[in-house]
Amino acid sequence: MTGSRRQFLIGAGTAAAAAAALAGPAEAARASHSASAARSGARVPLLLTRVADGQGASRAELARLVPGTPVTLSLAPTDYDGRAVEVVAGGSRVGFVPPRRAEALASLLEAGYQADGVVHEVRVGGPRPEVTVEVRLLA
């Protein structure tokens, strides 16, 4: 095993554990499988999170999102958060990973790791649209 691969595996396991600690029991269960998934070259489930500040997309655009829609995640500093992580689907900004959950993810992105995700759930019927995504670390 090369040194960089070993460092990645250590980082992936640490990141998954950090995300699980920030999240809840569902993410903790996912994190237990992270090391074996990283060894296989798969996408490692990191966390399940709602998307904050959905003002980037209209209600109609959000309504077109369905579970399984791919999303991209990238660092996108804002006036309020220099380490914000933006969520984009189909070329349109959906919103941002909430700051508390974005801390560990921003550190991984800054270190050169890549992450993507899929839409888990979309609710547009209430007063505020809600989008939940599953964030995955690319192994």
Image: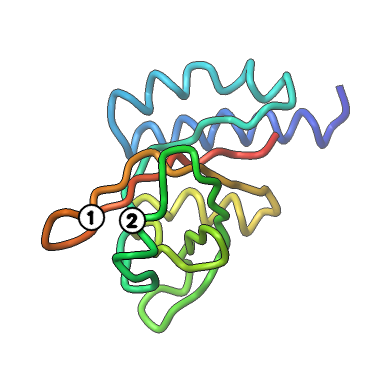
Apparent side of residue 54 relative to residue 4 in the rendered image (left or right)? left
Q: Residue at x 13, y 56 (%)?
A: 126
Question: Residue, x 73% and y 19% (percent of image)?
Answer: 40
Asked which secondary structure carries label 2, the reply is helix
- Residue positioned most to the bottom: 79
Residue 7 visible to an observer of this rendering? yes
The crowd level at tag 1 (other Cα within 10 Å; few <14, some 14-19, many 20+) is few
Q: Nearer the viewer, residue 124 or 132?
A: 124
Sequence-wise first label, 1 or 2: 2
Estimate the x, y position of residue 22 in percent, counting from the top left: 33, 39
Q: Residue at x 62, y 59 (%)?
A: 110
In the rendered structure, the answer to whether residue 38 lies left or right of residue 18 reads: right
Q: What's the mark number on residue 124? A: 1
Distance Cα–Cα, label 1 vs label 2: 6 Å
Q: Residue at x 60, y 39 (%)?
A: 137
Q: Nearer the viewer, residue 96 or 118?
A: 118
Q: Residue furthest left?
A: 127
* Residue type at numbered disc 2: Ala
Between 8 and 51, which is closer to the camera in this rendering?
A: 51
In the rendered image, which residue does mark 2 sit on? 63
- Asked if labels 2 and 1 touch by Cβ distance under 8 angstroms, the answer is yes
Q: Mark 1: which secondary structure?
A: loop
Label drawn at residue 70: none
In this orientation, does residue 53 appear?
no
Color style of the picture:
rainbow
Disc 2: CA contacts within 10 A as few (<14), some (14-19) or many (>=20): some
Q: Position of residue 95 (x, y in %)?
A: 39, 64
Q: Amino acid at mark 1?
A: Val
**Quadrant for the N terminus in the image:** top right
